[in-house]
Image: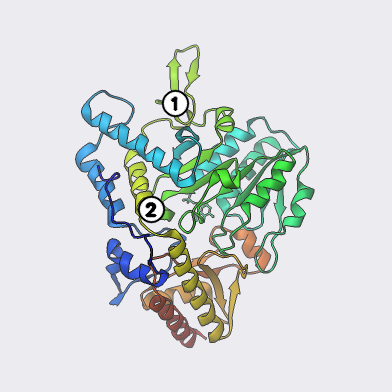
Amino acid sequence: MNIAAERPARNGPGWSPGAIPDAVRPDFPILGEQVRGLPLVYFDNAATSQKPRAVIDAVADFYRHDCANVHRAVHTLAERATLAYEAARERVRGFVNAASANEIVFLRGTTESINLLAHGLGRDWQAGDRVVLTAMEHHANIVPWQLLRERTGIEIAVLPVTERGELVLEALPDLLDERTRLVAVTHVSNVLGTINPIAEITRLAHAHGVPVLVDGAQAVPHMRVDVQAMDCDFYCFSGHKMFGPTGIGALYGKADLLAALPPWQGGGEMITRVTFERTRYAAPPQRFEAGTQHAAGAIGLAAAIDYLSTLDMAAAAAHEQALLARATEGMQALGGVRIFGQAPHKAPVISFLVEGVHAHDLGTLLDRKGVAVRTGHHCAMPLMDFYGVPATTRASMAFYNTLDEVDRLIEAIAYAREVLQ
Ligand SMILES: Cc1ncc(COP(=O)(O)O)c(C=O)c1O
């Protein structure tokens, strides 16, 4: 099995932020690709990040050597697969510093995690009960609550953002009362990059007895997450945005809260006893893992966590801040570029519009220069409405990106503007 493989420590003394890309880029085969005859510049990391060889190999090795259904048989391969799958759960536990591996549920990702919670938490909510969201949520943390609202008549309250892209925290206490059932907030905005003060939000919410769900999809690739230090009640994320495989993610929930949730899907593996008269359900996390699990994905996710553990995350974050600063300064120097999200604490995500140029046209021309960015509403239409724009262009960076790549982005924007304006 690859997931336990030793990797050289790259987080010792003397590790400088600027040295990170040279050290890590050889680990990511796709970064050597050419696009339109030019070296690829990949700035769409917030949509999905690229995978190091360690992850690709871990997934392939599972299929080559250990492929079996987990938790189901006594033969050797099944035992190896099950051990690796449960070892992966333990890796995720350590990654977010949960108290117990039983607090980690493997699901398809952030979207499925929030849908599970809307289904389970909301089962006995009633008309007039309230969930508090924020104006910077991804649709994944809006639509499941709207589906619940259609079924039950709950109220959705929205914590506003400032023009700079920060939450108006002072407005939160007014939304917290005996009818408030949950605060559901993103840790990092996928559009603005804003890093939200989760510990402060949980403190305010808990003072009113309200639990907090955190959408960590955009946080886990960039920072160490400690669910106990933040004291959040639920935390979810997707493997594919943190250098792991697609189709796998995790939901953390405090043990007592998970234990109080009903099953989400019915089927094999989530039961202790089934008769035609009644079924007894397994305890969490198995209660929420019906059917054949994505064992290869979980093992790949563990490999991504192991890979990240070989990096000095503080140095990686410092390098990402240097990328963000270079991109911001470069765009400001071009003139005529509007940047969305000016919070002092930002992940390396920069959404922008060039005066007189449609976001999609810009994205198409950047691709001609080998630069991959995202254009559109970024699944955050209410936030687009707040800023009065239908779409933006977004460059989102990772620790493997270089300052030279940022310069290529800025040059490509200047080229596109000349062509399009
Ligand atoms: C903040 C945020 N939440 C949720 C999601 C949904 O993640 P997934 O599609 O992996 O479930 C995304 C994806 O872009 C995101 O950026």
Q: Which mark is residue 270?
A: 1
Query: Residue 352: percent from the left, percent from the top?
Result: 55, 73
Query: Residue 360: percent from the left, percent from the top?
Result: 49, 72
What's the residue type where badge 2 is placed?
A: Ser
Instruction: Look at the image and tell me whether residue 36 can be seen.
Output: no
Identified at 43% across, 55% down, the residue is: 241
- Residue 183 to residue 41: above or below: above
Q: Nearer the viewer, residue 157 or 5?
A: 5
Dot 1: within a 10 Å radius of its alpha carbon, few (fewer than 14), some, or many (20 or more) residues? many
In the image, taking residue 411 as reference, residue 6 lies left or right, namely left
- Residue 126 to residue 50: above or below: above
Residue wearing tag 2: 309
Query: Residue 139: percent from the left, percent from the top?
Result: 57, 52
Q: Is mark 1 within 8 Å of ligand 1?
A: no
Q: Quadrant of the N terminus?
A: top left
What's the residue type where badge 1 is placed?
A: Met
Identified at 56% across, 35% down, the residue is: 254
Question: Tag 1's secondary structure?
Answer: loop
